[in-house]
Amino acid sequence: MRDLRELDRFRDVANGLAAYGWAGDGTCGVFTIPSPTDRQDMRVIASSGDGWDHVSVSRKSRCPNWPEMEHVKRLFFRDDEVCFQLHVAVSDHISIHPYCLHIWRPNDGQTIPLPPKYMVGPSAEVAA
């Protein structure tokens, strides 16, 4: 995860963690990010601990879309970091906000397994 102090211009110090007497640091915090699609606010809560980097992204009246999630990924994680959205079994669903999605990354040295690139689609060299 990036040093989140780089995103202080978006940090929400009036709400969120500030209510507990702490506004966050380089690994945690609450942020208000304008959507790249409609400039409406997205609420992002970032944390790092227990072997995971995590951001939750929510909107007031709908789930974030792909361009919004990609925008958040690029802001909060470095270009060389692999992150994922996780679809767990229904029995493991935990939902405290109806329009919230999550991005995860292990930060304890684990590598996220990736499928072979050819299974995702042709590479630029093959497609050209």
Image (spheres, rainbow, N blue to C red):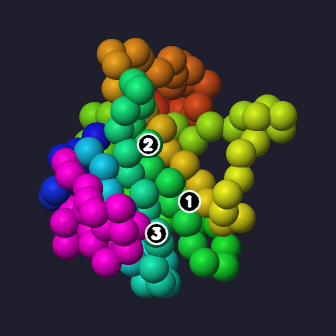
Cα separation, mark 2 vs mark 1, equals 17 Å
Which residue is tagged 1?
Answer: 66
In which image quadrant can residue 115 be found? top right
- Mark carried by residue 54: 2
Q: Which of marks 1 and 2 precedes in the sequence? A: 2
Kind of residue at badge 3 = Arg
Disc 2 packing (10 Å; few <14; some 14–19; many ≥20) = many
> In the image, residue 15 lies at what x, y percent?
38, 74
Callout 2: SS: strand
Q: Amino acid at mark 2?
A: His
Is 89 rendered above or below residue 4?
above
Q: Is residue 103 magenta?
A: no
What residue is rendered at 28% in x and 34% in y?
Answer: 80
Which residue position holds label 3? 43
The reply to whether residue 71 is in sight is no
What is the span of residues highlighted in magenta in the rendered image? 7-26
Residue 95: mark in rendering: none
